Amino acid sequence: MAFYIKSTDPDRPHYGYSYWSEDGIPISSLDPHVKAYSTESEAQTVIDTTGNWVHFLKSTGLTFSVVEE
């Protein structure tokens, strides 16, 4: 199993429920461009770190979570 960063904002149809690549590209389904993390804490660290693409998108109101697939 692997862990992924996923947005969870249904009010943003172009981002809502998207998986994300390592460089912040939204992808609607799991594919080779979606960044997989080996641990939940590794993915959560990306979400919690300031100054990256997640931090920027969070500042616009988008929400993120770690999912295991």
Image (cartoon, rainbow, N blue to C red):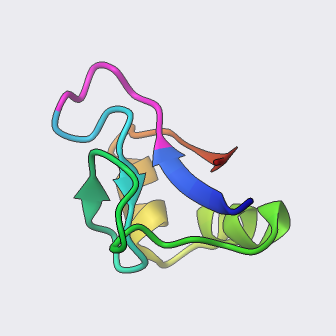
Closer to the camera in the image, 15 or 53: 15
Closer to the camera in the image, 27 or 53: 27
Image: 20 above or below 10: below
Q: Is residue 9 magenta?
A: yes
Classify residue 48 by image quadrant: bottom right
Residue at position x 32%, y 33% from top?
A: 16
Q: Residue furthest top?
A: 11
Left or right for 48, reference 6: right
Total number of numbered labels?
0
Residue at position x 58%, y 58% from top?
A: 4
Quadrant including the N terminus: bottom right
Residue at position x 68%, y 66% from top?
A: 43
Residue 62 horizontal/vertical position (percent): 39, 40
Residue 22 horizontal/vertical position (percent): 43, 78
Closer to the camera in the image, 39 or 63: 39
Classify residue 60 by image quadrant: top left
Closer to the camera in the image, 19 or 59: 19
Q: Which residues are magenta?
A: 7-13
Residue 30 horizontal/vertical position (percent): 40, 54
Residue 40 horizontal/vertical position (percent): 80, 61
Q: Is residue 11 magenta?
A: yes
Image: 4 above or below 32: above
Secondary structure of the magenta portion, mostly? loop
Q: Residue furthest left?
A: 14
Left or right for 44, reference 55: right
Classify residue 2 by image quadrant: bottom right
